[in-house]
Image (cartoon, rainbow, N blue to C red):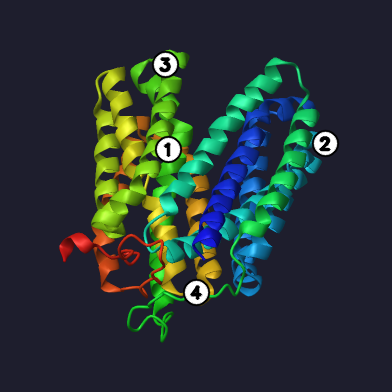
Amino acid sequence: METSLRRARLATFVYFALNGFVMGMWIVHIPAVEARTGIGHALLGWLLLLLGGGAFAGMRLAGPLTDRFGARAAVPVSAALCGAALVLPALARDAWTLGAALFVLGFGNGCLDVGMNTHAVRVERGYGRPVMSAFHAVFSIGGVLAALAGALALGRGLGVTAALTATALGALAVAALAAPALLPASSPEPATATPEPETTAGAGRGAAPRIGFLAVLAFMLMLCEGVANDWSALHLRDALGAPAATAALAYGSFATAMTVGRLLTDRLAARIGPAAVLRHGCALAAAGLTLAVAAPGVPLALAGWTLFGAGLAGCVPQLFSAAGHADPDRAGANVSRVAGLGYLGMLAGPAVIGPLADLVSLDLALLLPVLFCAAAALAARTLREAPDPAPVRTPLARGPLPEPGLDRSDG
């Protein structure tokens, strides 16, 4: 079982990286697709909503299907769909075909997102310690690799159709090769596993209100991530007058801090508990964005965006993990609820900040995510009131896994 669990963890890393790479290749080639279809920025913005709508639909469908058929069946199929759909935007010739292509791509991405996170919860349960944040870090690394590969392809004059087709074929191959290492739907627990008391009976009792609460937190925090993605560079340029090259460092510092933070969060969560990670992380994020908004110059603003990314880094993975552990029999459905509402938050962030910035100023508009981070920091304490079933300990466990949503530091 130790070997199969390690292989399953490696396969989960592969699927997270694959997802990040596929979506990153789409992002890199957006300008080329926009030029080929002859649409403007405004229409592209509306069409991108179809990408989000497809992802939300995929998440809602994939959750129950993953619970029914198992991640070993759902994840490779979702990865294949997501990879194959990457070709469709390159084949689009007008707004209608591009809209349909983006919906299908979003649908595949949503299915894969839920499936791989649900499998990650099973792997985490088997390890008996936090491992979720590292998977999300690898997703970010996949996006970075896509940016580098896309830049190389564009620099060498490779057409958008050739580049996306090659990526799709590679994604199909990787999805198939990694599939056998995933945990089967009814894999037996290791002989040495010793469940904690009361871990089997009534595991899902009272889970629904808690999942709803986790979903609201995910909405707020992923809205904050969306704000950083779309407004960090504009903040430096418009509020502080930074040149475009310097302004781009705002998002770069945020994204780098997010990735590094997620690589470190699992050890921190094992030491102080997921709820403490959520509480302290949100507090740090609120302080960081406040610093960025109040900064009189670029250096302090960059420091603020860096702290914002470092604080947010480990928060959403704790919510996904808590949702998956709340009721093992409905892990996929619960993860889909939290991920789906969180994804809507990421889409809503730019849409909310833009009109708000027109009414007041961008600096004042950015105080909204500060308030969301502060509220999430205060709400993290309430998660301890609904303990989850304790995970199964395996020979790989290095001490007990803190129950998702519990804070061991408070005794």
Q: Is label 1 or label 2 in front?
A: 1
Point out the tag, 1 or 3, that comes first from the N-terminus. 3
Of 178 and 286, the residue lying toward us: 178
Do labels 4 and 2 touch, CB within 8 Å?
no
Residue with the mark numbered 2: 91
* In-image side of 315 versus 103 (left or right): left
Secondary structure under badge 1? helix
Instruction: Please give the residue where the numbered disc 4 appears in the rendered image.
Output: 189
Nearer to us of marks 1 and 4 is 4
Residue in the picture at 24% in, 55% down: 272
Q: Earlier in the sequence, mark 2 or mark 3?
A: 2
The local secondary structure at tag 2 comes to helix
- Residue 259 is labelled as 1
Amino acid carrying label 2: it is Leu
What residue type is disc 1 on? Thr
Real-space Cα separation, disc 1 to disc 2, in angstroms: 33 Å
**Mark found first going from the N terminus, 1 or 4:** 4
Q: Which residue is mark 3?
A: 246
Quadrant hosting residue 132: bottom left
* Among numbered discs 3 and 4, the one appearing first in the sequence: 4
Residue 131 in the image, given as x and y percentages of width and height: 42, 54
Figure quadrant of the C terminus: bottom left
Cα–Cα gap, marks 3 and 4: 53 Å
Q: Residue at x 54, y 48 (%)?
A: 13
Question: What whole-number distance in Å separates the C-alpha atoms at marks 4 and 2?
Answer: 46 Å
